[in-house]
Amino acid sequence: MIRWSFYSLLMQYLRSCKNICNFEGIAREPVHFVVKTTGSTYNCDYELPLKSACTMSNKVLSCFKRYLRNNYDLRRILRETRQLLEDIAAPSILPGEKADLLEKIQRVDDVLRKFTAIIAVGPDCFDVLKSIFGSDRIELENKDVFLRIVNSNSVYPPIDLLTKMAIRDEVEIKEVQLSHSLLKDGLQVLVSSKWSNIQMDSVLPITLYGVNSEELSPEALSDLVQLKSDWPELPLCLVCMQKDTMDRIDQQLKSIEFGPVSLVNDQSGFNAFVKSCLQNHLVSACLHLTEVQSTCIRSFILSAFDMARELQITPKRLQYVQEKESELHQSLMRVASDKQEEITELIERTLQELRETLLDKASECETSINVAGNSEGLLAVEAATKEVQQMVLSKLSSAVASQLASTVCCLQDSYVGTLQRCLEGLEKHCLDTEEGHIRATDALRQSLSAAYSVEISACPSSPFTSMFEWFRNLMKGFPVPWTSPPTIDSGWRRKVAADILDQLSASKLARGICSQFRFKIRTSHEAFQKALSSLENRICGKLERTEEQRVAIRKQHAPQLARLLLETTSMSDLVRYGMPRLGREIGRGQYGVVFTCDPWGGFSSCAVKSVVPPDDKHWNDLAMEFYYTRTLPEHRRIVRVRGSVIDCGYGGGCSPAVLLMMDRMCKDLYYGLQSGMSWLARLQVAVDVAEGVRFLHAQGLVHRDIKLKNVLLDGEDRAKLTDLGFCIPEAMMSGSIVGTPIHMAPELLSGHYDSSVDVYALGILFWYLCTGKVKMPLAFDQIGNKEQLWKNVQSGLRPEKQPHFDEQCWRLMEQCWSAEPSQRPLLGFVQPQLEAIMERFQNSDSSTSDSGVGGRESTVSEDSFVLLHSPSFENLAPTTNAS
Ligand SMILES: Nc1ncnc2c1ncn2[C@@H]1O[C@H](COP(=O)(O)OP(=O)(O)OP(=O)(O)O)[C@@H](O)[C@H]1O
């Protein structure tokens, strides 16, 4: 049997035992432990002792029990958060952050695993505890000895473990066993007149400093100052044992500007201090965990954005690269085929321009060779001739190449730069080039350098007559066998160079260059095509994986983590502010019931939406809604969600209710219009709604359910948007068909839509505002079902223009509900338009005339059509008061 009360201590103890490989505990009643040692497995159960006879310590006790339960729950959330992060294998989902986040989670875990102890310090600490426990046994002659007070008939971790964790090794420890309800459930008390004996960071300390005198002695004062300087963050409770001494001690502390401290002299003060210590500990752990979870979800959403962008842009890039390279290939081939004449002229020009320079260069020879005999002479002349020839041809090649390149416009940087960058970007995606394959960028580079690398060569296929022939011709000028062999000097070289130049035929050269050029372009184009198709295959594979990851983020990682985040923040809110007290029902939607609520969490005017998610999917959807709402920066046109609490006891504990606390408004716009609103007030609502939607779009969110009932009005009829149940960042959208039929843009049905669906809905809402009624548009009213409505809307059916409509208002709503999403104006245009309309009416007499002229009141409301294949909360029965 293992006591529940020592859950956390036991866990620490088990962890420190070397032969225990694994253990799990469930801190619900009855407590169940499974402990696996190297040899065997033990199952242990324990029923919680819940009733305590001692009323004095009952509050502390229940506080402590609640703390242990919450601590346990929080560690379950923490474990699941860690598991979720560890399971994410793809590095692109949490780039570079995973290790850091896991480390932060570990730190929260360490803090939560600390065992709780009342630590009584100071010279009068024994007196304090004697009065709390009403026992004379808490006394020691030698006050330097450390005392541990534990419940008499319980199993506790051995003292040596305690020593390791919380008390300095050299200190002598005595144990007193008492039978006291406060000591049940694992709280233990460590007493030492010297606080330095205790390693405060190893425990969750509830630190009491006992003062059993009329005032603080100088020693006690300096002791306290030292304590504060060593542990500035430590919550400290000064227990004043003697009557009416609190003011005096308070003054003393103020005079030395002692930091925050709780001064108590009765049980209720002590209870409050214990409660705040335990609460603060939990809340701070919740906050740290919340930070990790929020960072992760933010990172998920950013990754989803990147992925969506990649999925959208990469195919376009591939197509661009394909097209541009084809264009380039065709242009280069055209150059090679059509420009032979131009190249001939170019070569002729180059030859003329370069002739003198080339001859000078050839003659700049350092050594003169005297050719000795016939055979040697011939070899030397041949070598020298070759040298001159090479020099001439290479200079000529580069001059022709650079002129050629500069005349072909598709080789200019401005033409191919984007292509090259785009291709490099694509290849960076797929670093794993297939072995033995040339990269597309290299193939492209080869195409581009084809013109620069044209060579005028002396090979037989070159425009020269063969080398041998040419050399024979050259030799004709010399008597053979030589009587006076030629001296290979600058004059000779110059003559050879002149002969070479004279021999060159520009048209032959041009033909050779063109065929060389064509060959190079063709081979590099083929290489490019091959490389690109292999790149395309790899990119397709990668995009498939990216899409899978995006779906995983959207459907799995983000909602699961959002749910854990909702649980964590709800626990924090519950610990801090308690369960809200619900009043009367003020509204009911498809997914929840809205109640009035007593002041909660410092907010005097609250409404509570109670939702009972029936399954995991609905839980996740609700959690995502809560995440978006809670992380949105505060905005005057969005109803603020102030907090949440999970009521685990709801429905007998089997179907927990989520309570979302938000600012309470007076009514919704539907009710507002029904009860009558002036034209100017309605225009103001239109401006407010446009401002709210504009803000959401600026945050990257799409509302997807703009309608009369989701616009709430305050006491001055100013509007705020609520119900972000369908609100979602564009990158996380899966194409779900959500919304309220008559406000739904036609493209919503196709599943391919963007934020402009909100503009469409705003156009419809503005129509209602202009009519000033909740009566449906006549054209819609006559349609019996949503399928027919959608069909008609897709064919262009829209609300009718009423005779009294202002022309500018009508134009604006028509623009907003354009069939083509790209034709709909942005909110940055709509809002100023509405403001201008409002200003015009404010300044004119017509402000008094109401543009809403009554017609036949329809019995059909905007919500009358059944709501849609929404991803969330389908078939959810409305909840009842969850209090
Ligand atoms: N913060 C609030 N203050 C005052 N009344 C509210 C508040 N929130 C909601 N209500 C009222 O409760 C009604 C139901 O709200 P809720 O958000 O649950 O549903 P809904 O938006 O009408 O429907 P659905 O959730 O099906 O889209 C609203 O129409 C409104 O009248």
Image (spheres, helix red, strand yellow):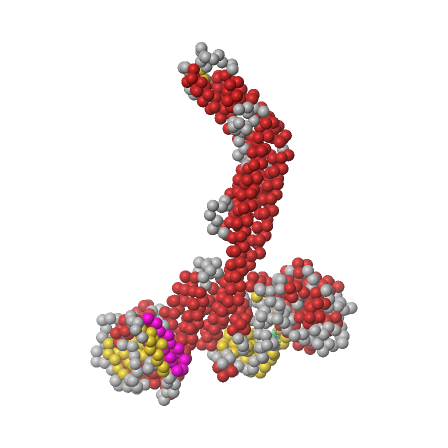
- Using the image as rendered, state which of residue 520 and residue 745 is in the foreground: 520
- Residue at x 53%, y 58% (from the top left corner): 544
Can residue 106 be spotted in the picture?
A: yes
Magenta stretch: residue 700 in it? no
Q: Position of residue 227 (x, y in %)?
A: 31, 71
Task: Name the residue at the top extreme.
Answer: 483
Spot the residue most to the right. Answer: 803
Q: Quadrant of residue 867?
A: bottom right
Q: Nearer the viewer, residue 675 or 469?
A: 469
Residue 420 appears in the figure: no
Q: Residue 207 at x, y = what percent?
A: 33, 75
Residue 295 x/y as whole percent? 47, 64
> In this view, which residue lies farthest toward the left?
141
Q: Which residue is drawn at the image coordinates 48% and 16% (left, top)? A: 491
The rendered magenta stretch, by its main secondary structure, is classed as: strand
Residue at horizontal 56 percent and vertical 80 percent from the top: 879
Assess whether residue 24 is covered by the magenta stretch.
Answer: yes
Q: Magenta span covers which residues?
A: 20-33
- Quadrant where ligand 1 appears: bottom right
Quadrant for the N terminus in the image = bottom left
Which residue appears at 48% of the width and 17% of the height? Answer: 492
**From the viewer's perspective, is 26 left or right of 523?**
left
Q: Nearer the viewer, residue 216 or 40?
A: 40
Residue 561 x, y percent position in the rendering? 48, 68
